[in-house]
């Protein structure tokens, strides 16, 4: 394997491990605090989904759950598997297809970050209604950046590299 | 050696394998023997025209989507409206610079840069012009594709409206429609900016 490819592989591995570690605080810590008519409510990613579900908005809750919880987790799991399989001459077409899916679907996990930015923009009405970002948002954003750059670093050509070098 | 014996090879845009190039009958495609991805389609340079058209429209709508308010939120007579960039400023002022930077890049700069890069490459291919750094810009367009997240922003806007509706009165503003149109343009730009066609177009230019 060339030095360049090796560096790309190591970068992808480092980013995926970092993403897996940061995924825990991203889901435990609140991403925002909403104040509505003086009532303060910190919300985690899952808390936001739960709130939508409890309000009878199951389809919207489902979209947010898929985009913010399932997609980042599946992306991290898929990238981990692809990196674990690196260099093995098996299921390369399927691995290539999985990488393409990860690359295409992965960006939908940005829904929660955009949602936070919209709520923070309009939620500037003091005690009546305000939305403030919390540290969970930083960890969540970091997970997304790690997964985006990891899937960018581990390109499709690397799937076809075997332990002996490039496949024919 | 006769001309007919010369074998032409092209690189697969996905796995970079060398594929034996040959003239394709109309309507057929050349697929990579290794990864199965489409390498070439039997069509001329003109097939990048839809990508060019949608990128042009997208750049125009990006100005409108960023210049008009998207939502108005009202609680007890107190009203607040927002632009895409307002969210970036709010997050920055709250001390969340990295999150603000991510929103700025994925919701504003990334889509505009991506469509500008697509416009440059597609226009060069359609007009058969050898503009500078075409290959580099094509690579940039490919890399920025993952950062063109306007459709995701549009979905987040819908979720935000649903959430805010529980707390006060929310009204859609003109900017929301421009965001929707921009999302469609960006989806179609990605769809029509086929890597095989780009590679083919650049090959024919150089």
Image (cartoon, coloured by chain):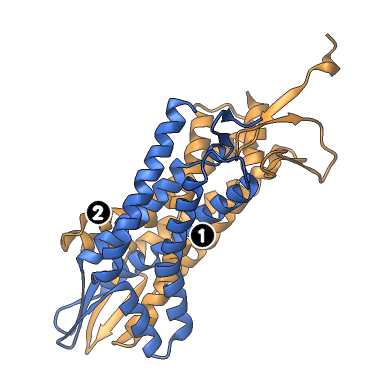
Chain colours: A blue, B orange
Question: Residue B54: x, y in percent?
Answer: 57, 52
Residue B76 vs residue B134: left or right?
left
Q: Which mark is residue B98?
A: 2
* Rendered view: B84 above or below A100: below
Name the residue tied to disc 1: A105
Q: Are marks 1 and 2 in contact (CB under 8 Å)?
A: no
Q: Which of B191 and A75 is in front in this view?
A: A75
Q: Nearer the viewer, residue A87 or A19?
A: A87
Mark 2 falls on what kind of element?
A: helix
Question: Residue A12: x, y in percent?
Answer: 40, 43
* Rendered view: B147 above or below A138: above
Question: Residue A130: x, y in percent?
Answer: 20, 77
Mark 2 belongs to chain: B
Q: Which of B204 and A79 is in front in this view?
A: A79
Residue B122 vs residue A76: left or right?
right
Q: Which mark is residue B5?
A: none
Q: How crowded is mark 2: few (under 14 residues within 10 Å), some or many (20 or more)?
A: some
Residue visible at 58% across and 49% down in the picture: A95
């Amino acid at each position: 394997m060339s030095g360049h490819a090796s560096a790309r592989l190591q970068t992808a591995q480092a980013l995926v491990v970092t993403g897996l570690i940061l995924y825990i605080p991203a889901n435990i810590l609140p991403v925002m605090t909403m104040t509505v008519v003086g009532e303060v409510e910190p919300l985690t990613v899952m808390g936001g989904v739960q709130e939508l579900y409890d309000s009878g908005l199951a389809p919207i809750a489902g979209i947010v759950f898929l985009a913010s919880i399932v997609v980042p987790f599946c992306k991290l799991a898929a990238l981990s598997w692809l990196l674990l399989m690196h260099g093995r001459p098996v299921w390369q077409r399927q691995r290539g297809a999985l990488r393409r899916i990860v690359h295409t679907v992965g960006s939908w996990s940005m829904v929660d970050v955009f949602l936070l930015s919209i709520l923070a923009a309009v939620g500037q009405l003091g005690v009546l209604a305000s939305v403030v970002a919390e540290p969970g948002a930083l960890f969540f954003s970091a997970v997304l950046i790690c997964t985006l750059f990891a899937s960018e670093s581990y390109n499709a050509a690397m799937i076809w590299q075997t332990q002996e070098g490039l496949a024919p | 050696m006769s001309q007919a014996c010369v074998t032409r090879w092209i690189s697969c845009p996905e796995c970079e394998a060398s594929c034996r190039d040959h003239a394709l009958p109309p309507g057929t495609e050349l697929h990579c023997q290794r990864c199965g991805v489409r390498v070439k389609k039997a069509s001329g340079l003109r097939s990048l025209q839809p990508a060019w058209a949608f990128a042009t429209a997208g750049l125009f709508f990006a100005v409108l989507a960023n210049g008009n308010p998207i939502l108005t939120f009202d609680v007890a007579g107190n009203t607040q409206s927002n632009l895409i960039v307002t969210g970036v400023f709010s997050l920055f002022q709250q001390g969340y610079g990295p999150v603000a930077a991510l929103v700025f890049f994925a919701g504003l700069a990334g889509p505009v840069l991506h469509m500008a890069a697509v416009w440059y490459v597609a226009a060069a291919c359609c007009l058969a012009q050898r503009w500078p750094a075409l290959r580099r810009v094509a690579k940039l367009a490919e890399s920025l594709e993952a950062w063109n997240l306007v459709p995701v922003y549009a979905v987040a806007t819908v979720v935000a409206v649903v959430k805010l509706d529980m707390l006060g009165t929310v009204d859609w503003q003109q900017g929301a429609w421009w965001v929707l149109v921009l999302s469609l343009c960006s989806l179609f730009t990605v769809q029509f900016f086929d890597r095989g066609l780009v590679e083919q177009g650049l090959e024919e230019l150089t």
